[in-house]
Every structure is written in C-alpha cells, then in structure tokens.
Image (spheres, rainbow, N blue to C red):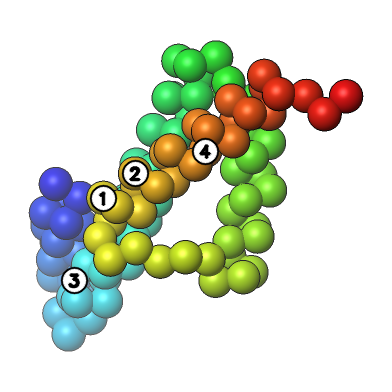
Amino acid sequence: MIKKAASALGIWLAQESGEIEKKNVLVYGLEYIIGSLVKILSLLLGSWILGIFPEAIAFLLTAIPLRLLSGGAHSKTYWRCYSVSMISTFVFSFMAKYFSLW
C-alpha cells in the first residue's frame, strides 16, 4: 500500500516537474516519508488508545534522536521495523507508567 502510493505520487511528481530521470529518487523518498508518517501516527494513536500517551511521547522524544545518532538496528522489511517499533514503544511506555523506581 505504501509502496503503491509512493510510486503513484512519485511518478506524478516526476512528470509534472519534468524530472523523469529523478523518478526513482522521488519514489524512494516518498516511500520513506509516508512510511515514517504511518509509523508515527499509528504509534501515537495506539498509545492514546492504551492510555500511555504521555509515556509514549517521552519514549519517542528520547529514542528517536538516539536511534538517529547511533544508527540503530535495521530490519530487513518495513513491516518488521514497524512491528518492532510498535512493540518496543508500547512495552517501554507501559514500564514507565506502571513500574516506578521510587
């Protein structure tokens, strides 16, 4: 779904801008952007539904910069990355909410 949407939008943008030779770059960039938006929005919605929204925001505000600066782990597929991101965010957010060190 994400790949199809990015491909259609990338091809359209390449044709409209007259930059047909940059079609693959546009499609790749759009696929990354759309995939990231889907991941972040579903993480926020899921955490809101589960009642761990503030903890998830705190986790994401610390984990995203750390992952960007350190390179982070890489999954072979988008859906594996999505699943690992969802599970780790929810687990650590639940831990932050229900397990106190004090």
x and y, in percent, of residue 45 in the image: 43, 25
Contact flag, marks 2 and 1 (Cβ < 8 Å): yes
Contact flag, marks 2 and 3 (Cβ < 8 Å): no
At mark 1, the secondary structure is helix
What residue is pinned by disc 2?
Answer: 83
The residue under label 3 is which amino acid type?
Ala
Residue nearest the observer in this picture, 6 or 46: 46
Tell me the distance, in whole angstroms, between the alpha carbons under discs 3 and 4.
36 Å
**Relative to residue 46, is residue 15 drawn left or right?**
left
What residue is pinned by disc 1?
Answer: 79
- Looking at the image, is 39 positioned above or below residue 91? below
Q: Earlier in the sequence, mark 1 or mark 3?
A: 3
- Picture quarter containing residue 93? top right
- Looking at the image, is 102 positioned above or below residue 6? above
- Which residue corresponds to the image point at 59% horizontal and 25% vertical from the top-left? 94
The residue under label 1 is which amino acid type?
Trp
Q: Earlier in the sequence, mark 4 or mark 1?
A: 1
What residue is pinned by disc 4?
Answer: 89
x and y, in percent, of residue 6 in the image: 20, 57
- Dot label at residue 14: 3
